[in-house]
Image: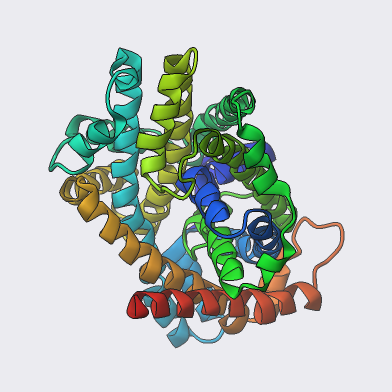
Amino acid sequence: MEPKKEAKFSSRWGFILSAVGSAVGMANVWGFPAKMGANGGSAFLVAYLIFVVLFSVVGLSAEYAIGRRAKTGTLGAYRLAWQTRSEKAGKAGGVIGWLPLIGSMCIAFGYAVIIAYILKALWNSLTGELMQVDTTAWFESFSGADYSVIPFHIIVVVGTLLTLLLGAKSIEKSNKIMMPVFFVIFVVLAVRVSMLPGAVEGYKFMFTPRWEELKDPMVWVWAMGQAFFSLSVTGSGMIVYGAYLDDKEDVVKVATRTAIFDTIAALVAALVIIPACFAYGLDVGAGPSLLFVTLPRILQDIPLGQVFAIILYVAMIFAGVSSLQNMFEAVGESLQHRFPKLSRKMVLVILCVVCLGFGLHMEPIAKWGPWMDIVSIYIIPIGATLGALTWFWIMKKSDILDEINKGVSKSHGNLWYNAGRYLYVPCALILCAVALFMKIAF
């Protein structure tokens, strides 16, 4: 089922900003600084950059390409890839595609809850309450209680789904606003943090080479996992954006630019989080509490802290909503493709009801945390692995190379394909195996 003409992104930069919006999210703002802080600082950064280059040039471009070739999202793309072998295999691929798609929906449930927390933090920043409370007690008051952020949760889910009414057109328009504002805001915050006494120790930690840390295999594993998650190479979400990409575009170049801006976002976030934590002697690996306990405590102590709190949480909402858009769009488009009688409005209503229904039962972080662990440890790595195997071991080589080479000035051949087969696929398999082992062992 070919997408309507108006479903295309209108420009290359509109596509890139939308893709960056999907990639930029919690993985950048607290995930990257936390993992960098816990895994050797600059050593982690070196490993991370190596994986980002590989995964963007090979994995992300492959997801864009298969989406463009199928002219639809996850379910249709897997069916098409497997169908290059046989009609029977195509049916099996259509079934297999449900697992990474379910991963997108499952992570959306939990993601919507954490964005609701951020919206509450923004509201309390606007009212001034956040500047006066004990941040630990404040965070525990809603993160540990049932149904504590229902109004904010409804606003997040309904508001995000409304931005999807016009498909690629509305996704592109919203991200053309949200992503530039996000970058400007974090640059402003980074400049302000640089003025804190002791911030220089954070910069030293980030950029002083400690090459001995690279001998630790877990530094590489954590960097690899962060690169997969940060680029949204999950075997699902980026496929649907590829379906809206014009045939004239070079998908490898587009994927590379997506990765560059995503990495800049991660580094700018780290330039805010890590020096601030060093300046105040706080734990950089605090995870979600970093946004709701650590940073508010810092903001309470600096001039114009309320203003900077508002700025921070607006940026975080933009980052979260742009990622949530992609998760919902991946699921919604695939459901429309699989059940063509469903209108887009009806699909969005169904997603709204399901997300609110499941999400309301995950509001306490005691429930949200384990749920997100299950999704990130099992479903997402398995989905990414299925995607990698599908593009480079199941789909015919000639078919994927034909799509990769559309719109290019210089063709990609065996080097690109073998990097996918013998580097990218093993990375996905290793990540999946390590994640499962760590869950069993610990």
Q: How is the image coloured?
A: rainbow
User: Which percent across, then down, holds residue 211?
Assistant: 73, 64
Q: Quadrant of residue 389?
A: bottom right
In this orientation, which residue lies closer to the viewer: 345 or 203? 203
Residue at point 40%, 21% (across, down): 300
Visible residue check, residue 121: yes
In this orientation, which residue lies closer to the viewer: 241 or 26? 26
Residue at point 20%, 30% (across, down): 151
Q: Quadrant of residue 297?
A: top left
Location of residue 89 with respect to 325 vertically, above or below:
below
Residue at point 48%, 20% (across, down): 308
Visible residue check, residue 248: no
User: Which percent across, then down, holds residue 216?
Assistant: 62, 72
Q: Is residue 273 left or right of residue 441?
A: right
Location of residue 38 with respect to 283 vertically, above or below:
below
Looking at the rendered image, the quarter that the C terminus falls into is bottom left
Q: Quadrant of residue 266?
A: top right
User: Which percent across, then down, holds residue 25?
Assistant: 48, 44
User: Which percent across, then down, holds residue 44?
Assistant: 63, 59
Q: Is residue 409 left or right of residue 442?
A: right
Number of on-image labels: 0
Looking at the image, the residue that sits furthest to the left is 146
In this orientation, which residue lies closer to the viewer: 86 or 207? 207
Q: Is residue 73 left or right of residue 395?
A: left
In this orientation, which residue lies closer to the viewer: 38 or 430? 38
Location of residue 388 with respect to 5 vertically, above or below:
below
